[in-house]
Image (cartoon, rainbow, N blue to C red):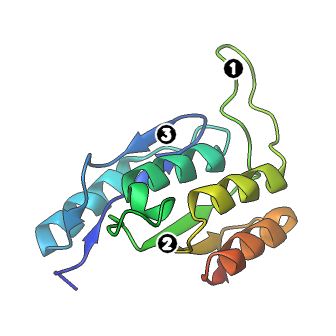
Amino acid sequence: PETAKFNMIAFDSTITVWRESMMDASPKTVDDALKWVRALRPKGSTYIDGALRKAFRMAGLGAVDKAYDDVNIDTIVLLSDGAPTDSGAPGKQATLMDDEIILQHVREWNRYKRVVIHTVGVDMLPYIEFLKKLAAENGGKYVDR
């Protein structure tokens, strides 16, 4: 609905945020978001851990500390088409990242389960179980595309 707020984070070996704050889902804003997505060009690695870290920073302290009432977001939809990698050191190729490390980070960032994480896998047969577990541990659902 137009009253909803949203933002997007694109990730490869880097993290790019569409807007610095959550945006109303007005028709114009949604159109602007779609233009931004269509202009994205994939280029390599899949830094899921970094994208989730950024999303939880945007969620605010309420996601990790029950002393804070407010959480800026209530849902993350993670869409991925690749194996989770680290960001790669400058000048070095990104390497596969242990799924369990990412899951542990999310357990810390979302310890009070205030943020639901849904996952969408695109042509990711070897990594479906990771995405399924990430969604299941965070009240979400996994969808295969």
Tell me which label, 1 or 3, sits earlier in the chain.
3
Would you name the residue on which mark 2 appears?
115
Residue at position x 77%, y 73% from top? Answer: 133
User: Helix, strand, or loop for circle 1?
Assistant: loop
Marks 3/2: CA distance? 20 Å
Viewer-nearest of labels 2 and 1? Answer: 2
Can you tell which mark lies on residue 89? Answer: 1
Given the image, on which type of amino acid does mark 1 rest? Ala
Residue at position x 24%, y 78% from top? Answer: 4
The quarter holding residue 8 reads: bottom left
Given the image, on which type of amino acid does mark 2 rest? Val
The answer to whether one can see residue 116 in this image is yes
Would you name the residue on which mark 3 appears?
15
Label 1 CA crowd tier, 10 Å (few <14, some 14–19, many 20+) = few
Front-lying residue, 63 or 106 = 63
Residue 70 screen position, x and y as percent: 32, 67
Residue 45 screen position, x and y as percent: 68, 40
Tell me which label, 2 or 1, sits earlier in the chain.
1
